[in-house]
Amino acid sequence: MNWKKFLIGVSVGFASAYLLNKTMSDKGISAEKALRNVKNAFKQNGPISGSWIHMVPEEYTKNQILYKVYKGGISRETAEGLKQHEFVVDATTGTILEIN
């Protein structure tokens, strides 16, 4: 086996893996990470009792700007009973765009 060809093959493999990883990471954050960010924000105001998130990003328009977003919900127990909150999170940056 020729060492020169072997090293070229290894180099091409590493470069391809790096570029693929870079391309995949530029697509935004995962739904799990988005939910974790929202839960951490809600936990600052007290404990939460449940949460969910739709795993597939969808298009959402706010102030005439088109976003790719995750939608989900958080529930918490209050003195008045169970309170539900729905949220919209930017799938690219993880920024909370709306809470209802």
Image (cartoon, rainbow, N blue to C red):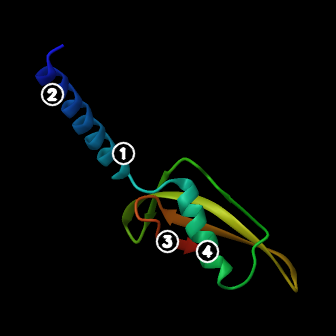
- For label 1, the residue is 24
Q: Residues at badges 2 and 4 in contact (C-beta under 8 Å)?
A: no
Residue 39 placement (x, y as % from top left): 64, 70
Residue 58 placement (x, y as % from top left): 49, 51
Q: What residue is shown at x 11% (from left), y 23% (from top)?
A: 4
Would you call the spot at circle 1 few (<14 residues within 10 Å), some (14-19), or many (20 or more)? few
Q: Which mark is residue 8?
A: 2
Q: CA distance from mark 4 to mark 1?
A: 25 Å
Would you call the spot at circle 2 few (<14 residues within 10 Å), some (14-19), or many (20 or more)? few
Would you call the spot at circle 3 few (<14 residues within 10 Å), some (14-19), or many (20 or more)? few
Compare residues 21 and 59 and report the one nearer the observer. 21
Callout 4, which amino acid?
Asn
Assign the N terminus to one quadrant of the image.
top left
Q: Earlier in the sequence, mark 3 or mark 2?
A: 2
Q: What residue is shown at x 28% (from left), y 43% (from top)?
A: 18
Q: CA distance from mark 3 to mark 2?
A: 47 Å
Q: CA distance from mark 2 to mark 4?
A: 46 Å
Q: What residue is shown at x 59% (from left), y 77% (from top)?
A: 41
Callout 2, which amino acid?
Ile
- For label 4, the residue is 40
Residue at disc 2, secondary structure: helix
For residue 19, above or below residue 92? above
Residue at disc 4, secondary structure: helix
* Foreground disc of the pair 2, 4: 2
Callout 1, which amino acid?
Met
- For label 3, the residue is 97
Q: Residues at badges 1 and 3 in contact (C-beta under 8 Å)?
A: no
Q: CA distance from mark 2 to mark 1?
A: 24 Å
Residue at disc 1, secondary structure: helix
Q: Is residue 15 left or right of residue 78?
A: left
Callout 3, which amino acid?
Leu
Compare residues 29 and 8 and report the one nearer the observer. 8
